[in-house]
Amino acid sequence: MLEKKEYTQFGETIYSEELDNGLKVKLLPKKSFHKVYGIMSTNYGSADNEFVPYGEKDMKVYPAGIAHFLEHKLFEKKDYDAFELFGKYGADSNAFTSFTRTSYLFSATQNVEKCVEILLDFVQEPYFSEESVKKEQGIIGQEIKMYDDDSGWQLYFGLIENLYHNTPISQDIAGTIESISKI
């Protein structure tokens, strides 16, 4: 059952529910908005490169940048591209990875139910082939090089690296060209 929480100081009401499968759903109706925004976030980010995979017993270590790599790869399917599928229904889509989460989102003015369906389906159905993995490694490698040329980004991650050395947070969210080549 939806739980209702009012924030009178902001004139907002948020409806929340946790589904039987553990998925937490939050709705924030905005009567004056013409566009609908949907986002699905997981508690899996760049700092989460050591864990015990579901159904296994032993800790595994994954290369830096694995969460960001998966963020990219989930949009690509064997027979279609999720970006293009959202576009077919008039929606914009995107994704981002932080230290602690990966989020997938869309905005639409129509076909909202179909876009929610696409959002929930494409993140649960990964597709990997040797060729598609190599292709994505190249794309992310170019992204890393682009950020390497950004002095503001270098300053930010230089500070993070010095503050949190010897932790996964000290590594760039996208990893390095070397680390993503190990995926």
Image (tube, rainbow, N blue to C red):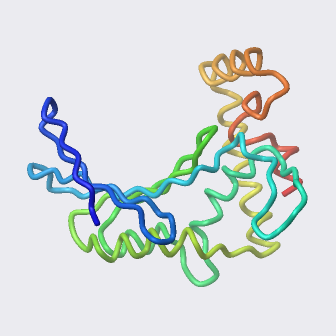
Image position of 132 (left or right of 3): right
The front one of 6 and 112 is 6
Residue 76 locus on image (x, y percent): 60, 70
Vertical side of 170 occupied by 87: above or below: below
- The residue drawn where x is 12% and y is 37% is 11
| The image quarter in which residue 144 lies | top right
Q: Which quadrant of the rendered structure holds the N terminus? A: bottom left
* Location of residue 35 in the rendering, given as x and y in whole percent from the top left corner: 21, 56
- Quadrant in the rendering for residue 150: top right
Furthest toward the bottom, the residue is 79
Q: Is residue 99 above or below residue 50?
A: above
- The C terminus lies in which quarter of the figure? bottom right
Residue 123 image offset from top left, x and y in percent: 55, 68
Q: Position of residue 137 (x, y in %)?
A: 77, 56
Q: Given the current orientation, which residue lies at the most extreme left position?
A: 32
Residue 139 or 118: which is nearer the viewer?
118
Question: Image quarter for residue 168?
Answer: top right
The structure residue drawn at horizontal position 33% and vertical position 77%, both measured from the top left corner, is 114
At x 9%, y 49%, the residue is 32
On the rendered structure, is 107 left or right of 5? right
Number of marks drawn: 0
Question: Left or right: where does residue 122 sit relative to residue 136?
Answer: left
The answer to whether 50 is drawn above or below residue 54 in the figure is above
**Which residue shows up at 87% across the image and 50% down it?**
61
